[in-house]
Image (cartoon, grey):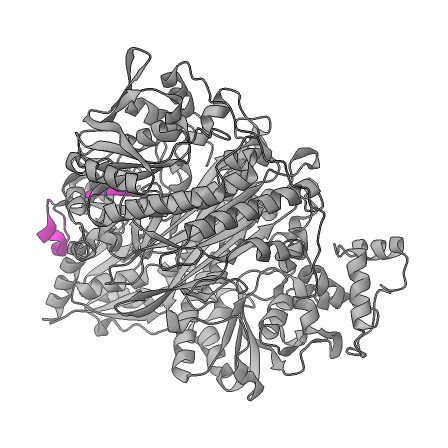
Amino acid sequence: MSGRIALLRFPGVNCEAETALVLERAGARVDWIQFGDVLDPDDYDGFVLPGGFSYEDRVRAGAVASRSEWMRALETADEAGKPILGICNGAQVLVESGIVPGGPARAVRLALAANGGEGRGGYLCRWVHVEVTLSACPWLRSLDGTRWPVPVAHGEGRFTSLDPEVIAGIETGSLCPLRYVDPEGKLASGGPWDPNGAVGSAAAVCNERGNAVALMPHPERAAWLRQVPEGAPGEWGARRRSARTAAALEAPGPGQALFDAFVHAASGVRV
Amino acid sequence: MPSSTGSLVEGALAAASLIDADLEAGLRGRGLNLKIDEARRLAAALGRDPAWPELFLFDAMWSEHCSYKSSRHLLKKYLPTEGAHILVGVGEDAGVIRVPTADGDYAVVMAHESHNHPSQVLAHEGAATGVGGIIRDVACMGAEVIGILDALRFGDPFGANAARVRTVMRGVVEGIAHYGDAVGVPNLGGDAEFSPVYDENVLVNVVAMGVCRAEDIIHSRVPAAAASEPYDLILVGKPTDSSGLGGASFASVTLTGSQESLGAVQLPDPFLKRVLLAAQQDVQRMLKESGAEVGFKDLGAGGIGCVASEIAAASGFGVEIDLDLETKVPDDLPAEFVLVAETQERFAWAVPARLTPEVLRIYNERFGLPRMYPGAGARILGRFAGHGRFVVRHGGRVVADVPNELITSGISVHHPVRRRAAPAPLATPAVQDVLALLESWSSSPAAASRRPIYRFYDSEVKGRAILRPGEADAGMFLLRWGGPEGIAVTVDGSPGPLEADPRGGAGIAVCEVCRNLAATGAEPLALTDCLNFGNPEDPDVMGEFEDVLEGLGQAARAFGVKGGGPLPFISGNVSLYNQRSGARSIPPSPIVAGVGLVPDYGSATTPRLKQPGNPLMFLGRRRGAFAGSWAAASVGLGGRGALPDPAELGAQVRREVDLVLEGIRAGRVHAAHDVAEGGALWTALEMAMDSGDPEPLGIAVEEEFAPWMLEEHCGFLLEVSPGDSGELQRRARESGLECFAFARIIPGGTLRLRQGAIERSVALATLAEARSSVLKGIVP
């Protein structure tokens, strides 16, 4: 049966429409939860926090939203092990709320700092490559080892922590389901394909149980083959270049698989 | 004829009887730029002394910025604006064209504005509110705003005023990024040029694109139904404050260099705008279901005074507004300020009074506007009336009462014009060492990679991107989800040719837009323009203005559209009083934007080279016209010189575009790029620099180097398969165009060419590296 997904529409998010389309294509029934609405965690099988600038990034990106009324519902869902996905600003909210990486009393143990590194300061919009690596996240396991292009668009996307346990979890793998790599699959760390200088080249960090994922790149902008740039290196670029009609370019892009896996996991929870 | 209206209004300034000096002092003392004869004219039309709110209103509405008083008659004379595919032409906030699809008719909405003066004074806020304003212009037509473009003219970042120029550059780029990224509208492209003539007057032009179903277009006017049932004027967004006070009037004067105008710059709030746009979708859905006719318009220059008068006057109505109903910051803001302040993030609806409560509920409760920003919300400001007057109450008294038509169509000025003599042709530049020339270009701002600018712009949000900044000659986005149509959009306005020969340069701007669209596979459908010029009181400036308009019109008519008729201008803007140091006007700097359709975006084409062994064909016509080119400037042949006649060039480019589109749609053209700055040689380099995966590609030029290879704006370079080149040449001959193999694509990232008897080569990676480093560290 299809998963029911709550799409949390904090004021200032701006990626909800395309994110809903991709989720629906993955088979989900999507409800847009409007700010001011009550969120009942029992009504949904999965939760998505889309990208944007919730509450104008006041204080810090994600900080105000992470204190919103919906967070208690999200915590309940988290405790039930339901899949939770925060994309870009949504990732910032999950980190600011302590849901990712989780732990005692949901203390904030992780930060998304300003992009850093030589020539990488400030907001950056570009296509990068990520590789799915084995982690605590059960619902990304089917994508393990896949490598694909995806765009980033953020100013504060550098996962970092003062907690040695969290650093170790990201670097050794259990907390890090996606890493930035170069087109050949080498870790991007510090090189030209590293967009922000994150610890362990982390593109995403999950909680210890793996159900909640804070993801900085935008797979919903890479969910149609059309969206992949013609010049993208590797297999996906070649596939993009060989598709010569709109019909062929309507095929799923690399990002769709992540949503398929997410919705599949959400549907499984209900079953 | 004096009118007897407004007898209740207490006059403030004896505009009819005061002597010039006293009237001047009275107006300037309140910060107004209204001219003496205009104030007298207002008094005569009213038959009494005008009150301050009235003087402030007319100061804004009779400003150059709002009234187009110096340009309206010339725009009408020269620019084609008609077309069977136009849904909304010039006159509203944006132009709209109809695009038929298998799923019914869609509307593509396009608006084009400048925000030059504010960006010079307070770069970040000025540029950001430029983006905010153009987004409102498209949103108020009922469309979803799906992209923006920015055309920027900066000073010389390495010149005498480098520090100031870089500060402005940083602010402008940050402002555009800050607003566009946060409001969630992707950047589709744009351009940036650098010249010391803009050291003290940056140009920031913005274009916004929108899409909706054709039947969902909302006009910026009170519906006729308002004659038979009461219609409210609802204001939505921020409370009125004194930010942007006198902005319209400010945009119509010469900058003095002092900071006294800071208050005239508006303050941006993309967060609030994002919430407003989200709420608007729900409001529109509700209104559509109600079946009621409505009007919708954004607030920009002239604030409440402008929106209320124009939305009513557009269908011959009057309006009565009560400023006591408006939320003001501070609460005692004087009436004249409330009337014309350009507080950002506001819209105005004209809806039947019976639907007003539901509109207010959606904005204020469902989307919680009052919780998003102190004092924000939707509120009733007044009611439309059949009497044709513009009546304002404040503090329980009538403080303005004037014939509405006087506000919106009151004024026209015909400045003296001195046309230039036609320039003589320029000599062919003599180039001693072409590789050295290419290397020097690669490290110049003109040729620099613009990535250090557009990396700050979100080009992916909304998920509709097909071609993004830096990928091709035009940006392209999906018209509708699940449909095959791509919409291409681009801007152009090369400073070199425009300075060399304004009429010829204007023709080139139109032709470049058409070539850029066609190079991606799009058929050009419509244009917009922003005419950035200097002081209209200078007859030479007005001469250039007419030259440019003539060139734009001639090229657009000659190029035309499929099915007959001219390529129309559907919207635009005029920005005057742009000046450089010593109060000299900037050179003519029109920016032309164009929109085109690709029926199946699978055929979208980029300049990226595909296959070693393929020929790179030149298609076009060489004329030996080097005026305004990089090559001419590099050998000291700057200044004026003749360029092709716009009508002749427009007709030629139509024939080129037909062949290019035919080739692209048949799958025979694998890469395309128009021959622009730097001529065929630099164009070929640009195509090769980003090509190849995983191994880079290069170029071997077939003939010995000759100066024509640096001639600009003369055609296309097209990659075809070896077996298809003969047919292309045959078709070109039939069309009276030149076509030959200019170069061959080779493996390995080098350019090879002969100059004299010597075979030379250069690594493309070296040139690319130089190009990419010029602007690094200059933009933030």
Q: Is residue B213 left or right of residue B627?
A: left
Give x and y (percent) for residue B303. Answer: 62, 64
* Quadrant in which the N terminus of chain B is drawn: bottom right
Query: Is residue A142 on the magenta stretch?
Result: yes
Examine the image and state in which quarter residue B714 appears. Answer: top left
x and y percent of residue B312 in the render?
Answer: 60, 75
Does residue B109 appear in the picture of this structure? Answer: yes
Indicate whether B328 appears above or below B160: below
> Which of the 4 quarters of the picture holds residue B38?
bottom right
Find residue B234 and report its horizontal and vertical position in percent. 55, 75
Q: Is residue B313 left or right of residue A38?
A: right
Depth check, front residue: B259 or B523: B523
Question: Observer-nearest residue: B515 or A238?
Answer: B515
Residue B179 magenta-drawn? no
User: Which residue occupies the extreme bottom position in the image?
Assistant: B228
Identified at 11% across, 50% down, the residue is A143
Residue farthest top in this picture: B757
Q: Is residue B567 left or right of residue B113?
A: left
Q: What stretch of residues is rendered in magenta?
A: A127-145
Give the total of numbered labels: 0
Q: Residue at the spot x=56%, y=26% of the render?
A: B159
Give whichever of B425, B761 is nearer the camera. Answer: B425
Residue B696 on image: x %, y %: 21, 29
Q: Is residue A213 above or below residue B747?
A: below
Instruction: Give the quadrant of residue B242.
Output: bottom right
